[in-house]
Image: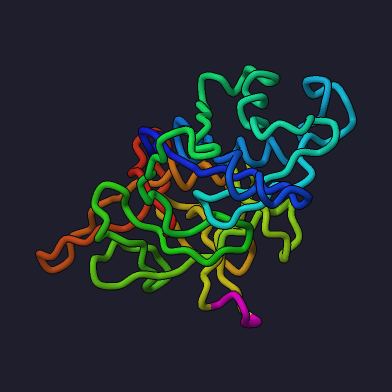
């Protein structure tokens, strides 16, 4: 896992009841990891009544004000309680080991917990992001001479696009999504460049033809390899499933 625990505020916002919206239905969601949180969000977008066997959506609204602040409203098929996040874990028990909802400060009745800031950018379709080591946060992916190097002085943005979504669809990305990794500085040109595996070794190289990765590859499939030139050692990024560096997207 790339995180030990990850936290989200999930706020009830019934449009017809502004008094309750301003005083009740404040939830803190504790997840096993950030990836689990985003997968729960995507699950909730399409979750239906009758414990998933029905055809009616449980959320009439579910939006992301940021990666750690979500707002929601119940559909008529989920009842009127602001505790829908808790019911989601009850009705869909596969989430119970992964997600722990807790109701906060409804009508000033509970202590308000402050969650840590754990996300600098939202991992949405088409986002332009830096990629850095999660353990050594000064080390970034850096594009130079058709390879990706590790740099503490330079950094390069990459655009992550899911192949199943339209370019303007701001879906949050989850681990099983198939994605392309595109050099941001070339994205609006007639000669885009995509990150692809080398055909001769484990290095990551670039091509004008897209290559389909899994989004989870960004967290468990890329490592580094040392290259020494004139007694100076540099590191470039390689494909190394099972021995990956833990990366973060910011």
Q: Is residue 243 magenta?
A: no
Picture coordinates of residue 99, whole percent (x, y): 52, 27
- 230 relative to 46, above or below: below
Left or right: where 75 falls relative to 240: right
70 or 42: nearer the eye?
70
Number of numbered discs visible in the structure rendering: 0
Q: Give me the residue at 13% from left, 65% from top.
A: 232
- 192 relative to 39, above or below: below
Instruction: In the displayed orientation, state which residue is furthest to the right.
Output: 55
In the rendered view of the protein, which quadrant contains the N terminus? top left
Which contiguous range is marked in magenta? 186-190
Left or right: where 87 falls relative to 58: left
Picture coordinates of residue 6, whole percent (x, y): 42, 38
Picture coordinates of residue 137, whole percent (x, y): 27, 56
Q: Give me the residue at 72% from left, 60% from top.
A: 169
Q: Give me the residue at 70% from left, 19% from top.
A: 91
């Amino acid at each position: 896992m790339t995180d030990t625990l990850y936290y989200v505020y999930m706020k009830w916002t019934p449009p017809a009841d502004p008094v309750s919206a301003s005083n009740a239905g404040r939830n803190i969601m504790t997840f096993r990891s950030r990836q689990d949180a985003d997968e729960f969000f995507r699950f909730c977008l399409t979750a239906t009544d009758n414990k998933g066997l029905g055809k009616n959506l449980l959320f009439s609204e579910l939006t992301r004000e940021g990666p750690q602040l979500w707002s929601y409203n119940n559909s008529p098929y989920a009842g009127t309680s602001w505790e829908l996040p808790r019911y989601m874990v009850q009705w869909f028990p596969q989430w119970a080991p992964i997600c722990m909802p807790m109701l906060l400060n409804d009508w000033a009745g509970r202590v308000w917990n402050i969650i840590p800031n754990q996300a600098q950018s939202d991992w949405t379709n088409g986002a332009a992001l830096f990629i850095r080591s999660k353990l050594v946060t000064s080390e970034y992916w850096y594009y130079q001479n058709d390879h990706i190097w590790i740099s503490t002085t330079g950094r390069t943005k990459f655009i992550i696009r899911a192949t199943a979504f339209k370019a303007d669809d701001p879906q949050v990305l989850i681990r099983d999504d198939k994605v392309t990794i595109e050099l941001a500085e070339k994205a609006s040109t007639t000669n885009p460049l995509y990150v692809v595996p080398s055909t001769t070794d484990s290095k990551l190289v670039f091509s004008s033809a897209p290559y389909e990765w899994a989004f989870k590859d960004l967290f468990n499939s890329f490592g580094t390899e040392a290259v020494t030139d004139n007694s100076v050692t540099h590191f470039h990024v390689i494909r190394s499933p099972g021995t990956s560096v833990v990366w973060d997207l910011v």
